[in-house]
Image (spheres, rainbow, N blue to C red):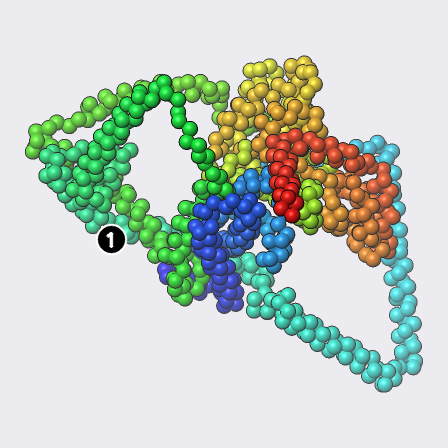
Amino acid sequence: MSSSGTDTAHNLPVTEQEEAYEMNHTYNKMWTDAQKDLDIQLQREREEFLQPEKDRVEAFKMLAASYIKYMQIFRNLETAHDRLIHRQKRMVIRQVLDGVIGRILEIKKEMVELENSEFHYIDNILEDLKLLPEDIEVPIPRYFIKEKLEVLQQREKILDQILLDAGLQTQKPVKAMTFEEAIKMIQVAERARQGRCRAAFMKQIYLEEKRERQTKLQVQMGPSPDAAATCIQKVWRGYIQRKKTEKMRGEEMIFLGMSLPPHLKAMNISQMHAGQVNALEFEVQERHEEVFIKDKLRETEGLDIKETLQDQIGQCFIECRHIIGKFPDYPTEEAGGSMAILSQKTPEQVAAELAARREMALQKKAEKGKKEQGKEKTKGKKPQKTGKKEEEEGWKMAPSNFLSIMEEGNSQYKAVWQNRSEGWDFLQDHDPELIKEEKREEVEEEIRVQVDELMQQKLENLKLAVDGEKSDKQKKGRKSEKKKKTTMRKKIPEMEEDLTPDRTIDSLYRELVEEGLLIKAKTVNLSDYVGEYSYLGTTLRQVDIEPMPSLADVRQLIALYGILPLGSQTVHEKAPLVKALLLAGPAGVGKKTLVHAICTETGANLFNLSASNIAGKYPGKNGLQMMLHMILKVAKQLQPSVVWIGETEKIFSKAAPKAEEMNPKRLEKILPKFLKALKAQDRVLLVGTTNRPFDANVKSFCKVYQKIILIPRPDYASRFVLWKHIILQNGGTITNLLNISCLAKVSDGFTQGHIIQAVQAVLSELRLLQMTRKPLRTAEFMTSLARQDPVYKEEEETFKAWYAKTPLGKARIKALADSEKAEKGKTKKGKGKN
């Protein structure tokens, strides 16, 4: 290990070293177990998924089992990546982690196509694997935010400053009051203060008088020795017994695995501070060490690398002239320079490959000629019917873009880390040998550029001296100039599409903020969207009843379609692309909360294109085009970004258009073009929210929104968890007098918004002060809840009927009808045989 690492190790306290080593050992083991599971899963994919499966039910079970296994691997890899300090290990884990996330999204797509539903119920598979529904909850990788925390903080400061300069209120406005109200409030507060002071003064006088009376009695009578001994014994025995009980309880918790042993407990504040300081030292030392290693390699190995490259390139020149008869042209920088010359193949192999390619080209030409002759002969003749139909092979897994990434990471783990001895690396921060290998490649690349310049000049001299050829630089220069001219001509139309070529991203960003089109997202995590798993989903589907999705299912879809692709560039480019997402459901089910959660978890910008927000802004066709162009340009440059359209049904409304400036339907025709401009590398997501989707034209609606998520009102289990969570979140305490089960039952039909309003109406500041002497009761929440209108069954049926008209809803109904026909056919055949 380097001297800097050893110095740091000496500075660390012994206890902190032991704890850091134990923690690294734990997470290293977690990583090892995850890699073993991944290896088994990759082997299974090679064996099972390559063969077609005729039974769709069995195919879905295979996919669901793989989905669950990949989710467990994802969870373990994410924890190891977040907790490990070792930089090189984190890089390997990150590569595999992106591959696993992408594979989960691919499997999810296949599951949706098999079941024709976004929501899946796999209780039986979880039961067989002895897992809980919490085990398949999609974890949000913490590196989405950690890796760009400084950028996000700086962007938030800039946004706050623009809002302040524009006069937009970002803080809660101060409540205005009249002069008389202010005097009355001050008088009440002053009288209360004087009353409290008076009560404290009287209490002090009372305690002093009581103390004087007790001292007089003690002086006159004096305590008896037996009473004093009994008092001391009682106090001492109580103290000893409490200590013994506390010790026994701690040992029992450690034995049951519910608490850590003392040597594994978390560091105290001083140790944490020391750890933070040492972490900063590690970063600085690592940077200096990288620079030092690179400089040292350049000094010690630079000359040898340079001479070796020159000898190899010169030998290639001589061999090529011996085979071809003349010196070759030196490859350009775009072609790779000397990298193209120094391939691992010999000149004989290169010549043989060229000859083989020529023969293949001649064969292809001959085959094309035969085909054309055959077509001419068969002209005017009807194609003969073979009478054989292609049999359906059954379901087969689509090719994956992420298996190669996972296999590469897995092989790298086996080659470098699986059997690596790390007993010497006590701190587990970085490996100098691996840094040296990385830096050696950089040094070779730098030297290669210098060698290319020298050898190019040497080749020209050889050509002039041996073959008498002149350099072709001028010709090449003219050709390149012509190419540049043609490319510039081609690029001119693309540049004309940029409506703001002379404006910077900062100026566009400021204008969008001032116009209210780029807003500040609320800090809401996806875990704040509380909801339970649907435990009756499988049972209902077995009796041919389509269950309403639970809030936990909705939360998973938001993570899969919204958060994971936006957070990782690799995943977004190669995973099944989702450009637009629609959240439909009654008012109060948390659609806006989910939009803000996507932005919070990924650090995305939030653009508001709701009908009420864009009314009167950028009028006319050109103004609308300019607005969308600015949003698209800023969203691509500062990705990830979320474009939110609230009340999106108004854009696709069946009603007649209104005035041009206030008409929300003006976005209907341009939104498909907006989505078409988004490529796989652009981490931009269009999210629409609506509580009246049945008012819109279904065809145009479904063309824009690729994924439609129906969010229902919460079921009993979700309402039970919601009441408990919201009461505690608003400062309330739950006692035996508060029946949460009763509240969950009574609030059937009410949404999360209704429950939040009811709790906030009850838990005022005054009621929170009275909490200690007057606990909460069930009846208190009934009054505020009764004042609100619930979601009636008719409205819920309307949402179901609308969803049945969507492409996925139609496919689901058709699949169910086909399965019923097949079952009826089987029963009829069975009766005929009998």
Q: Does residue 704 appear anywhere in the picture? A: yes
* Amino acid at the residue labelled 1: Thr
Reply above or below: 119 against 617.
below
Report the side of 694 relative to 414 (left or right): right
As drawn, which residue projects farthest toward the bottom?
A: 226
The residue singled out by tag 1 in the image is 300
For residue 381, above or below residue 448: above
Q: Quadrant of the N terminus?
A: bottom left
Q: Number of callouts in the render?
A: 1
| Residue occupying the point 24% across, 53% down | 300
Residue 694 rendering spot, x and y as whole percentages? 70, 27
Closer to us: 165 or 410: 410
Q: Give left or right: position of 291 versus 780.
A: left
Q: Is residue 647 above or below residue 105?
A: above
Question: What percent of the width, then of the height, locates residue 267?
Answer: 57, 62
Please state the horizontal and vertical placement of residue 172, each as a whole percent of the image: 72, 36
Percent x, y of residue 92: 43, 51
Residue plotted at (77% across, 79% down): 237
In the structure shown, which secondary structural element does the residue marked by tag 1 occupy?
A: helix
Relative side of 73 to 364, left or right: right
Q: In this image, 4 relative to 127: left or right?
A: left
User: Which residue occupies the foreground of this view, 107 or 257?
Assistant: 107
Please say whether residue 600 is visible from this viewpoint: no
Which residue is located at x 73 percent, y 43 percent? 714
Relative to 600, is 810 above or below?
above
Disc 1: CA contacts within 10 A as few (<14), some (14-19) or many (>=20): few
Residue 175: image quadrant is top right
Question: Foreground: 595 or 61?
Answer: 61
Q: Residue at x 40, y 63 (%)?
A: 422
- Residue 516 or 206: which is nearer the viewer? 516
